[in-house]
Amino acid sequence: MKFARFLRRGGFIAAVLIIVLLADIALSASGFIQKSGFFWLDDFEITKRDHPEEVWDRVIFGSSELISAYREDISEAGYVNLGMDYGTVRDLAEILEGGHITVGSELVLALGWGAMYDDMDTNPTYEWHRKWYEPYFYFQRDRLSAFVTDNLKALMGEGEIRRRVWTQQQKAYYYGNMTQEELDERREKLHGLYFDGDLGLYAENLAALDEVFSFCEAEGIRVRVVWLPENPLVEPEPLDLELRESCREKCAAAGVEFYDMTDALDAGCFYDTGHLDYDYGAVVFTEVLDEWLLS
């Protein structure tokens, strides 16, 4: 009798686990979080929303500097702008190797110190951060719990029902130009955060470059690298220059074309030390870059 009760209880527990597992799979497969408009999206999700095709023939990858630099809307080269806040080369390696995107024929890496810094903050919702054993409900717990909490509060008269306010969400663009004083303050802040050390600060991402190059070679993808422009009003960081040359050497060793745009733009193009003004700087950048992309 005890054994029979154990089997019944075990069967009930197994049934509950199966239901939970199926619900988890269904939520993940539905794309509800990404498609509903009820949730804030990260930059990778925005890119996939705007480019739902299964294969992206041409892709240019970079961090936040690329978002406000390469204008897909005016470019004649036809690249998907996979610029992402906090995006690093290590992220790109995981994206490619994990099959999170499929590149058709060409991949360009738009590099700068931001895409190469090993301890760069990240967005926890980027899907490649999900462990293979991690339930989707748990991975999305912050967004889902906020959604449930907001709606429960609304039902109790303590707010409004969550609306589809993120259906047209865009990535962050930059407008205008910082003053010289603001630029100097920003350089000092960035130095303490990202340049207080040696090339060891970028070792993992330098190694990830080799992974990306090897992946592209195996998949028959043409890969190139562009080093993003920097504001001429800001004194260059010696370590930044050393990092650039290290990337150049890695490209040369792998037979990868390296396009150096460090000094390609005038100060009027820049919002700050590296982000471009979207209305003017990004237009100039895209026109200059297109000539190279189409070569």
Image (spheres, helix red, strand yellow):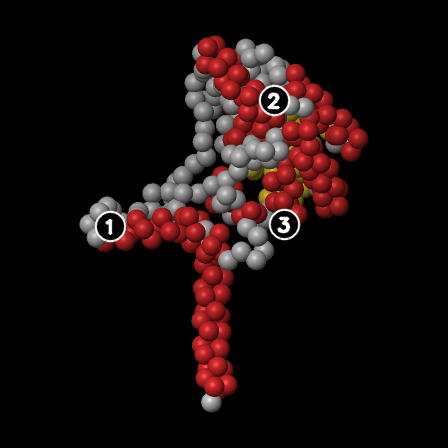
Q: Is residue 156 left or right of residue 195?
A: left
Q: What is the three-letter code of the residue carrying label 2?
A: Asp
Placement of 116 over or under 7, stated as above or below: above
Mark 2 sits on what residue? 196
Residue 235, position as x, y percentages in the image = 58, 12
Q: Earlier in the sequence, mark 1 or mark 3?
A: 3
Q: Residue at x 71, y 40 (%)?
A: 211
Q: Nearer the viewer, residue 208 or 227?
A: 208
Q: Secondary structure at mark 1?
A: helix
For badge 3, the amino acid type reads Gly
Q: In front: mark 1 or mark 3?
A: 1
Looking at marks 2 and 1 on the same chain, the residue that comes earlier in the sequence is marked by 1
Q: How far, Cα to Cα, is label 1 from label 3? A: 39 Å
Q: Which of the pair 51/151 is nearer the observer?
A: 151
Figure check: 218 above or below 293: below
C-alpha span from label 2 to label 1: 48 Å
Q: Which residue is tagged 3?
A: 98
Q: Regarding mark 2 in the picture, which secondary structure is present there?
A: loop
Quadrant in which the C terminus is drawn: top right
Residue 46: x %, y % from top left:
47, 41
Image coordinates for residue 19, horizontal then vertical, percent: 45, 69
